[in-house]
Image (cartoon, grey):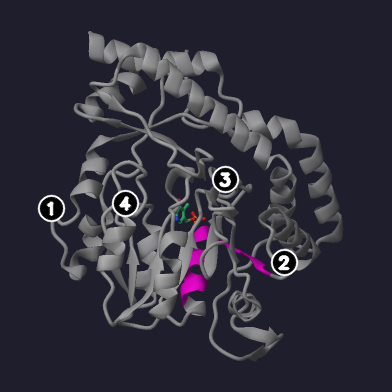
Amino acid sequence: MTVPILDLKRSFSEIKPEVSAALERIFSTQSFILGREVEMFERHCEKYLELPEGSCVGCASGTDALLLALMAIDIKPGDEVITTPFTFFATAGAIARLGGVPVFADADPVSYCIDLKSAMSKITAKTRAILPVHLFGQMSPIEEVMSELHSKGIKVIEDAAQAFGATRRAGDDILRAGCVGDIGCYSFFPTKNLGGCGDGGMVVSADKDTADRLRRLRVHGSGKTYYHDEVGINSRLDAIQAAILGIKLRHLDEWNEERRKAADYYKLLFKSAGLHEFIVLPEEMPGNTHIWHQYVIRVKSRRDELMAYLEDKGLSVRVYYPLSLHLQPCFEYLGYHEGDFPVSEQLTREVLALPIYPGLTENEQEELVNGIKEFFRR
Ligand SMILES: *Cc1c(COP(=O)(O)O)cnc(C)c1O
């Protein structure tokens, strides 16, 4: 049996007729960029995320969402933005593209998200923002530090590219990934929990002025067509993506629930396989509803050997991420060295992502865990 790392065909079969009808509709209007489809999708997202009307601004990618968010808080050369070195490159890349200085704070070994205590210790007079990532589908508890950050005039931008629909209980409140900080950023890259059929993203702010500015920034900084208040970028969501995402949004809770069931089943299988001396399982932190964008275990030793063994059997696994951002060649100028972020570095040596997606069968999960057991019990 072979198990792919991701198979989008399985969930797509549920929505194929709806998608075909939407494509038909769009091709008959020949209206492809922004417009009614995008506005409808933005309004649906506001309902889903329980944000005021006008808060959601569709854009061309998750990377652009981060860039637009940083532009909207006026990140200028030399401004410091604190973030994690254990994330997809775009998080720090967006900061650097504006001349900002990515200031890294180590990851937490259990949640894999930024260690907020360490992040707070990195604040200097130049710190303008903190950019936590809700990594692999669960939220960083940023509400705990929000008031302290705001009292220092520091903005919070959430990278929720992997966490659309993730929530967190804080006291009596239910917090939603991307809706806690000043600005939230989402990606609709096809492999994300909510993914389109091409690139797409969204940036959100409950603050009306910020949302209006984001809407201008995505169309070259123009409020009125051909009149430019400031220099923005070209970053628009298109009608086809918006229509497909709107259809998928209606299934998102059900698909995220399927991922949660699959995560529970992995936990059960690993427990009964008795692999705790070799494997550390991912944890859902207290209060969180994890949506399992990725199911990432830690392999205490011989991770790469295990990966080759599984791949050889047709069982696909992946390493997210193999090199901590502070050690990337392009960030050499920041002056970090090996050993600066021991947790992040250890994670890059130990993490292994197993298949998790709607339509993944119990049989396939059993095959995966059996493969891992075989490797260690040989
Ligand atoms: C996918 C991703 C992005 C970038 O999104 P794109 O749509 O691919 O540009 C940013 N941050 C994180 C954490 C991501 O996983």
Amino acid of disc 3: Pro
Mark 4 near mark 1, Cβ–Cβ under 8 Å?
Answer: no
Q: Magenta span covers which residues?
A: 55-70
Q: Is residue 7 above or below residue 43?
A: above
The residue at which mark 2 appears reads as: 34
Mark before the other along the chain sequence, 1 or 3:
3
User: Which residue is at 71% across, 61% downward?
Assistant: 42
Amino acid of disc 1: Gly
- Of residues 137 and 15, the one drawn nearer to the viewer in this rendering: 137
Label 3 – label 4 distance at C-alpha: 22 Å
**Quarter of the view holding residue 31:** bottom right
| Image location of residue 261, percent across then percent down | 56, 27
| Image location of residue 360, percent across then percent down | 56, 24
Mark 2 or mark 4: which is in front? Answer: 4
- Of residues 240 and 349, the one drawn nearer to the viewer in this rendering: 349
- Dot label at residue 198: none
